[in-house]
Image (cartoon, rainbow, N blue to C red):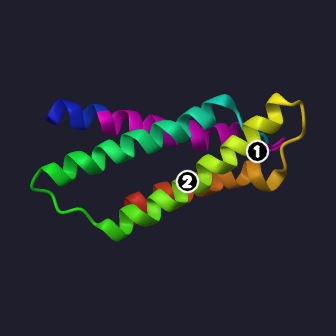
Amino acid sequence: MDLLHATLVFFHILGAAALVGGWLATFKKPSVGLFQFIGAWVQLITGVLLVGLASMGDTDVNHIKITVKLVLLIVILVAAWIGRRKVKRGQTVPTGIAHAVGGLALINVGLAVFW
């Protein structure tokens, strides 16, 4: 169980790194990269699995924190999806969409660390 938990945490952190790193890499010319979109999905899937593991064990789960982070991640995922759709069509990604993906991901990391 410890190996599963560690593996999920590892991929959860990689998802956050893809979101924030992709945002910082394209900061001057904002866009939404494929790895940002994949990172959002990785964050969602591993986050749900981590909460499920915690609920099965003896760990108390802060449901308010998890709900806030989940809602924020859904907004990130929708923004990343819109951005990727624009990129695929050859259109310019609105600056607000591109910065929403990375900025909200950074806020989500902050909530995980400081809450």
Please give left or right for residue 90 compared with residue 96 in the image. Answer: right
Inspect the magenta stretch and tell me whether residue 73 lies in it.
Answer: no
Q: Is residue 4 above or below residue 20?
A: above
Q: Amino acid at mark 1?
A: Phe
Q: Amino acid at mark 2?
A: Ile
Q: Which mark is residue 113?
A: none
Please give left or right for residue 53 compared with residue 114 in the image. Answer: left
Q: Element type at marker 1?
A: loop
Which residue is most to the right?
91
Quarter of the image with the N terminus in it: top left
Please give left or right for residue 113 compared with residue 107 in the image. Answer: left
Query: How many dots with numbers?
Result: 2
Residue hosting label 2: 74
Q: Is residue 32 above or below residue 70?
A: above
Q: From the top left corner, tell me how far across and down residue 59 is, in percent.
A: 15, 57
Q: CA distance from mark 2 to mark 1?
A: 22 Å
Q: Residue at x 73, y 52 (%)?
A: 99
Q: Which mark is residue 27?
A: 1
Q: Which residues are magenta?
A: 8-30
Q: Camera-side residue: 85 or 69? A: 85
Quarter of the image with the C terminus in it: bottom left
